[in-house]
């Protein structure tokens, strides 16, 4: 191996890699979806700030809870919302739970829970605030007496510049 000629290599190098990846995580309080009109999005409090331009992997975990007296038909949806842009994060609106209970006699009190998750990649041009939101949708029969989007967690890892 022959060493390069004097002056052929820079005296210093700038490396863009980080020893610790840009990442973060937030947990929010349960969101009461029953206290607002059906079809209204409610912020959960799980909110993060993507600190700089780049591409991020976003992930969220949560659960839903519906209680109602039969017959009832109610759904709970969740989404990631870009607070900075005032818009849905594309491809993240999901149905987390749907119940359509029509027992012959009616009048049965039922409570159902389900776990859900959201994940996507998002490219941003600067600092960007993202949050988890939930929505209760009364579909038919009786409405729910309790609807919660609970235990929300939202995390991110920067995957490229």
Image: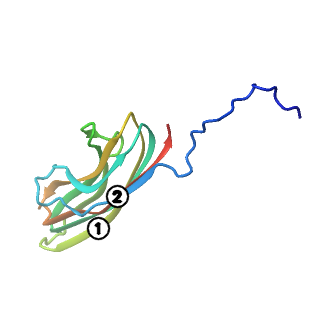
Q: Which mark is residue 113?
A: 1
- Of 117 and 23, which appears nearest the observer? 23
Residue 151 location in percent, x, y?
Answer: 30, 65
Residue at 26% x, 69% y: name it. Answer: 112
In percent of the image, x 40 and y 40: which residue is there?
52
Q: Earlier in the sequence, mark 2 or mark 1?
A: 2
Are circles 2 and 1 on residues that touch, CB within 8 Å? no
Q: Most extreme residue toward the bottom, as rendered?
A: 108
Say if residue 101 shows up in the picture: no
Where disc 1 sits, the SS reads: strand
Neighbor class of circle 1 (other Cα within 10 Å; few <14, some 14-19, many 20+) is: some
Disc 2 on helix, strand or loop?
A: strand
Residue at 13% in and 52% down: 38
Depth order, front residue of 137/56? 56
Q: Residue at x 36, y 41 (%)?
A: 91
Dot 2, crowdedness within 10 Å: few (<14), some or many (≥20)?
some
Residue 17 is left or right of residue 5, and the answer is: left
């Amino acid at each position: 191996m022959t060493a390069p000629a004097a002056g052929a290599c820079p005296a210093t190098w700038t490396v863009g890699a980080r020893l610790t990846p840009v990442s973060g995580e937030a947990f929010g309080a349960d969101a009461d979806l029953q206290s607002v009109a059906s079809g209204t999005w409610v912020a959960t409090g799980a909110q993060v700030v993507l600190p700089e331009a780049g591409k991020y992997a976003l992930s969220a975990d949560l659960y839903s809870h519906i209680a109602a007296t039969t017959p009832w038909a109610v759904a709970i949806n969740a989404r990631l919302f870009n607070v900075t842009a005032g818009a849905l994060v594309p491809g993240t609106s999901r149905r987390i739970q749907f119940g359509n209970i029509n027992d012959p006699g009616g009048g049965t009190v039922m409570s159902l829970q389900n776990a859900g998750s959201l994940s996507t990649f998002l490219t941003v041009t600067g600092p960007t605030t993202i949050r988890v939101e939930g929505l209760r949708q009364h579909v038919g029969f009786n409405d729910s007496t309790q609807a919660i989007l609970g235990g929300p967690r939202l995390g991110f890892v920067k995957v490229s510049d």
